[in-house]
Image (cartoon, rainbow, N blue to C red):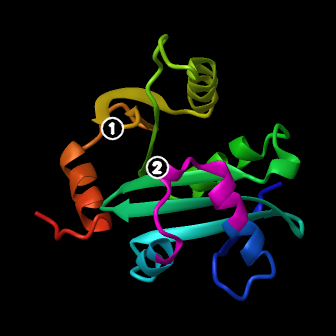
Amino acid sequence: MPLTVKLLNPSLPEYRQVKALYYRAFPKYEQEAWSRLLFKRLSRRADFLVFYDHDHFVGLSYVIHHYGIHYVLYLAVNDQVRSRGYGSRILDQLKRQYAPDTLILDIEQPDAAAVNNHQRLRRLRFYRKNGFTLTERLTRTPEVTYQLLATRQRVDHTKVDEMFAWFNGRTFG
């Protein structure tokens, strides 16, 4: 049975829960300002989605769009219902919602020297199980190197760069 999906807005009864999950689920260096996420979603180039199983809040995603590519910037499952298949169900829902386009996302690149390499490998297995494949694209930050995954073998990296340029406040090239 599909999950119910709503666009985030401050009038949702779970608004505070969604915000709290966002801040718990992602390290500070990965977090965008909450107000920025809310502002960017107004453009219709980004969706801040809240997922429910019946009336129970189970997760969130933030997806940026650009010409047939949908970048899952954030995906988090409510701590109270983790490990019950909701992450896979959310991804299935996103794949259906944005079909026939390509979904992409980044994960921390597996690295045997990393303290959390076990977690990185587990995340990679999860996304592979859900139809994502590794690409060769790496993004290096001071904290970590990310590797891009996609639901298709070929990804137009120019479009990906343009998407990030828009999200980061620069105009399209």
In this rendered view, identify the residue nearer to me: 172 or 25: 25
Q: Does any portion of residue 60 appear in the rendered image?
A: no
x and y, in percent, of residue 141 in the image:
32, 39
Is residue 74 part of the magenta span, yes or no?
A: no
Tell me which corner region of the image, top left, top right, bottom left or bottom right, holds residue 11.
bottom right
Instruction: Count residues near mark 2 (Cα–Cα under 10 Å), then give few for <14, some for 14-19, many for 20+.
Output: few
The residue that appears at 77% across and 46% down in the rendered structure is 86
Q: In the rendering, which numbered label is found on residue 29? A: 2
Q: Does any portion of residue 3 appear in the rendered image?
A: yes
- Up the image or down, 117 lies above or below 49; here it is above
For marks 2 and 1, give the CA distance: 9 Å
Name the kind of residue labelled 1 in the image.
Answer: Pro
x and y, in percent, of residue 130 in the image:
61, 34
- Up the image or down, 131 lies above or below 3; here it is above
Count of numbered badges drawn on the protein: 2
x and y, in percent, of residue 3 in the image:
77, 60
Question: Which secondary structure dominates the residues rendered in magenta?
Answer: helix
Which quadrant of the rendered structure holds the N terminus? bottom right
Mark closer to the chain start, 2 or 1: 2
Which residues are drawn in magenta?
Answer: 20-35
Determine contact: label 2, label 1, CB under 8 Å: yes
- Up the image or down, 172 lies above or below 93; here it is below
Instruction: Count residues near mark 1 (Cα–Cα under 10 Å), then give few for <14, some for 14-19, many for 20+.
Output: few
The residue that appears at 81% across and 81% down in the rendered structure is 13
Which quadrant of the rendered structure holds the C terminus? bottom left
The residue that appears at 73% across and 77% down in the rendered structure is 15
x and y, in percent, of residue 32 in the image:
46, 62
The residue that appears at 46% across and 28% down in the rendered structure is 133
Q: Is mark 1 on a helix, strand or loop?
A: loop
Disc 1 target residue: 142
Name the kind of residue labelled 2 in the image.
Answer: Tyr
